Image: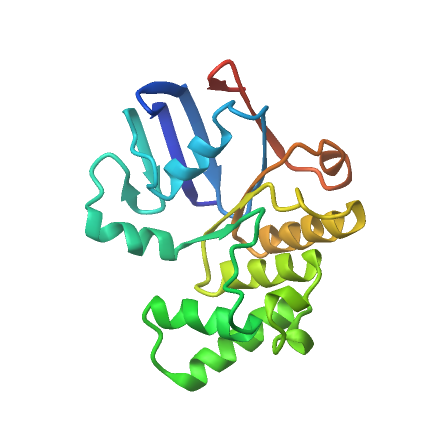
Amino acid sequence: MATVIDYKDVELHRQDLIALKHVNLSIGEGEFIYLLGKVGSGKSSLLKSIYAEIPIASGDAKVLDYDLNTIRRRDIPYLRREIGIVFQDFQLLNDRSAYANLRFVLEATGWKDKDEIERRIEEVLKGVGMLNKSYKNPHELSGGEQQRIVIARALLNHPRILIADEPTGNLDPATGEAIVSRLHDIARRGTAVIMATHNLAFIDQYPGRVVRCENRTLV
């Protein structure tokens, strides 16, 4: 199993304050990681550091084939193409259909062939059970349906890592459970999934490795 994230004694800062210190974390392909911790415990800082939104203050940090200490600004978009991100608040473009939202991402990341674009969009929408609603705008979809579109969007570029930041926070329990089940399916197909959550019930239903942000470090 190849390692996709390897942090050794990493320290992260937010606004000149230590967010996390002595972070040692190794994640392999296809692993499912639950990231727990109170608000302000450093969860978001850790996730943002993985896709180079927050710099590494000290320590060694490698994500995929990139050294985060020395990564050049022009290489960050290439790193991010290999990382899918699922947000709690969806962040879909409301002025266009679900299908057009996905096409926008592929075109923005360099896809040119219209047939390939169409084929890939249909593939990911089918995978999340949303092919029949792809013509609808986000406001016409339920929260759970929007989140499934967001997962489809995150999978477009065949990511090796999927980050889900409180993906069930705005959903009812049954819909949240379906989303977590879907994320576990993605991990089984070889993508490393890191899911930040406050919901401990998911861990019993869908077991995974648990990492907790506590006292400014990882447990």
* Relative side of 185 to 69, left or right: right
The image position of residue 133, as x and y in percent, is 67, 75
The image position of residue 139, as x and y in percent, is 63, 65
- Given residues 16 and 81, the one toward you in this image is 16
- Given residues 155 and 139, the one toward you in this image is 139
Residue farthest right in this picture: 174
- Given residues 48 and 26, the one toward you in this image is 48
Q: In the rendered view, tell whether residue 32 sits above or below residue 56.
A: below
**Residue displayed at 60% across by 65% down:** 138
Quadrant of residue 145 within the rendered picture: bottom right
Q: In the rendered view, tell whether residue 37 sits above or below residue 116.
A: above
- Given residues 201 and 25, the one toward you in this image is 201
Q: Quadrant of the C terminus?
A: top right
* Relative side of 207 to 105, left or right: right
Q: In the rendered view, tell whether residue 87 sits above or below residue 118.
A: above
Q: What kind of colouring is applied to the model shown?
A: rainbow
Residue farthest bottom in this picture: 115
* Relative side of 102 to 63, left or right: right
**Residue displayed at 52% across by 52% down:** 191
Quadrant of residue 6 within the rendered picture: top left
The image position of residue 24, as x and y in percent, is 42, 24
The image position of residue 128, as x and y in percent, is 65, 65
